[in-house]
Image: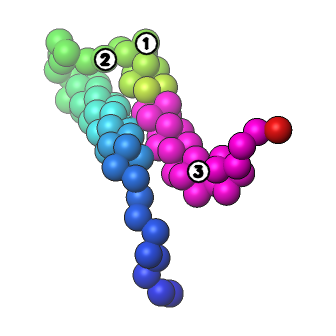
Amino acid sequence: MAPSSVTTPPAALICFRVAASLLILYVVDVLVGKAAVLLQFSVPWRLGNIGEFVVVLAAVIFFVAGVLVIEARNDPQQRRDPI
């Protein structure tokens, strides 16, 4: 496969990095919760159900925003004047 000469916009990279960071935060929280249950210890800083939902929702929003930035840059229809 030939390398692509198209570069990813910086705004999209930021969105993808934030989404990945939030997803990593979610996974770490779930793994710490699982370890707390298995090893029977208490963790005072867990996100909880609502916190986990908000973190995953924010990750999805940032991911979609990054994809939309790339699509807006690559879409030839965006460059035309509306009728």
Q: CA distance from mark 1 to mark 2?
A: 7 Å
Identify the residue at horizontal 43%, vertical 26% (top origin): 58
Q: What is the x, y in percent for residue 65?
A: 50, 37
Q: Where residue 66 is drawn, which disc sits there?
A: none
Question: What SS does tag 1 mark?
Answer: helix
Is residue 39 among the parts visible in the rendering? yes
Tell me if 31 is positioned left or right of 55 in this view: left
Q: Quadrant of residue 27?
A: top left
Dot in front, 3 or 1: 3
Categorize mark 2 by other alpha carbons within 10 Å: few (<14), some (14-19), many (20+): some
Verify whether residue 65 appears in magenta.
yes
Q: Where residue 50 is drawn, which disc sits there?
A: 1
Verify whether residue 80 appears in magenta.
yes
Identify the residue at horizontal 20%, vertical 29% (top origin): 39
User: What residue does disc 3 label?
Assistant: 71
38, 17: nearer the viewer: 17
Residue kind at label 3, given as amino acid type: Glu
Residue kind at label 1, given as amino acid type: Ile
Q: Where residue 47 is drawn, which disc sits there?
A: 2
Label pair 1/2, CB-CB below 8 angstroms: yes
Question: What SS does tag 3 mark?
Answer: helix
Q: Is residue 50 above or below residue 68?
A: above
Q: What is the x, y in percent for residue 51?
A: 37, 16
Question: What SS does tag 2 mark?
Answer: loop
Q: CA distance from mark 3 to mark 1?
A: 31 Å
74, 15: nearer the viewer: 74
Q: Quadrant of residue 21?
A: top left
What span is in magenta? Answer: 59-82
Label pair 3/2, CB-CB below 8 angstroms: no
Residue kind at label 2, given as amino acid type: Leu
Nearer the N terminus, badge 3 or badge 2?
Answer: 2
Nearer the N terminus, badge 3 or badge 1?
Answer: 1
